Amino acid sequence: MKKLEPVMISGREVLPIVEGGKGVSVSMGASSGAFAAAGCVGTVSGVNADSYDDKGIIIPQVYHGKTRRDRWNELIDYAIAGGIAQIKIAHEKSNGEGRIHINVLWEAGGTPRVLEGILSGAKGLIHGVTCGAGMPYKVAEIAAAHNVYYYPIISSARAFRALWKRSYSNYADLLGGVVYEDPWLAGGHNGLSNSEDPLVPQDPYPRVHELRQLMRKFGLGHTPILMAGGVWYLREWQDWIGSDELGPIAFQFGSRPLLTQESPVADAWKQRLLSLEEGDIFLNRFSPTGFYSSAVRNQLLNELEARSARQVDYASKPEGDLTEALPLGPRARPVYLRAEDKPLADGWIAEGFSDGLKTPDGTIIFETPETAAKIHEDQQGCMGCLSQCRFSNWNEGAEGTTGKRADPRSFCIQKTLQSIAHGGSLDDNLMFSGHNAYKFATDPFYEGGRIPTVAELVERLISGD
């Protein structure tokens, strides 16, 4: 294994090991501070992180507003308070070592306000801002206003070119690095484009080499690239380390920090990670963001898959080949289906999936009355956790709506991520995971159910394993 040389990140030389920021209340202060204390980069998630009362008890994120806009404002307040609380914990635990970053998702609800609030409230404690999930043009301006480095998360050189030309070239001095996130192997929301096949992964080396060539054209030859997604053993990346062709490289780990003593995820979640098998991680498009996402296949994802399978085209009145009437609802108002789809719908209704729910794509799905009522309840309870949501049709702009029909084929992502982060069911909630998480079960480091400290994990990573 090649020796890992320090890399300049956010104004300090650190080990080229970066903790990946993971969603709602998963990358927290204790874990991030421990990574920094080990001479690495710790990353606090700024997406609705936990805050605490005077007794150190987590404050439940309960919403009281009667309108979506009111609840959206409450969500932003929770996110700011939680982000500040976790950054302060990370700073204290870092012992002044390493670097501490905060990760935000550009398409999350109120991100510009959240980021401004956290950077102001934790002034001087944050060294870098990592941002993905969309095209975060404005993150450079916000970070620069607070004299903080910024790190866009991209999945192609083309995306970085657009960001640079429109915005980042104006704030080049504070571009601390570029995170290349493999859109096939990374956990959480992935940056697959419509031209890329989700079932045909591409080798990351040519894509990262293309990114470095572009960055050199922009005078960014010495700006680090952070490789994220699919990184498990550093010995598998030795050709990247010290490569003149790729330039400065650091490696971001998302999945492995989940299984540490400092990780805040529930014990049941940790035990599930230890038992995953290859194929258990499911790249899907059920997220209300509309992005692909990678998560552990469970009852929730199976139900969403089955829900979409119970789907046919419909019309509100006979047109074209949509001529077969199907009465639905308490008033038995008909929708019109194709002749070949009518027996399918009749069969689903006979099985108990008697409620027809219309989608924004001119189709109708069939669900049980109980599940249909739950879908409507979750849609009505929307708290604006995304800038726009296909599940509830929320849009945080002045109009408050996407203008499209709410999509029952998706789900309330805020509700399920908050639940699983605080000990909720592993079957009924979304469990984001990188593709390589199945390696927990076969990696000798975790033999016998061992759960290491962050310091032990970092030592292991440095060894190549």
Image (spheres, grey):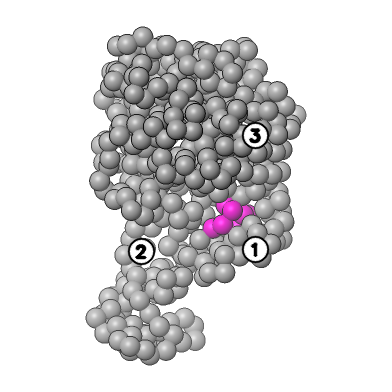
Q: Amino acid at mark 1?
A: Gly
Q: Is residue 144 above or below residue 159?
A: above
- In the picture, measured across the screen, residue 39 lies left or right of residue 438, that is right
Q: Do labels 1 and 3 touch, CB within 8 Å?
A: no
Q: Which residues are magenta?
A: 382-389
Q: What residue is rendered at 61% in x and 34% in y?
A: 171
Residue type indicated by callout 2: Ser
Question: Which residue is at the front of the view, 445 or 237?
Answer: 237
Residue nearer the viewer, 358 or 421:
358
Question: Looking at the image, which residue is at 53% across and 13% down?
Answer: 13
Identify which residue is drawn at 74% across, 31% down: 121
Q: Quadrant of residue 344?
A: bottom left
Dot 3 alpha-carbon crowd within 10 angstroms: few under 14, some 14 to 19, many 20 or more:
many
Residue ID for mark 3: 143
Membership of 384 in magenta stretch: yes
Q: Residue at x 52, y 54 (%)?
A: 412
Residue occupied by mark 2: 308
Whole-angstrom CA distance, mark 2 to mark 3, is: 41 Å
The residue carrying mark 1 is 400
Could you say where residue 354 lies in the image, as x and y percent from the top left?
A: 39, 74
Q: Quadrant of residue 314?
A: bottom left
Q: Position of residue 298 (x, y in %)?
A: 36, 47
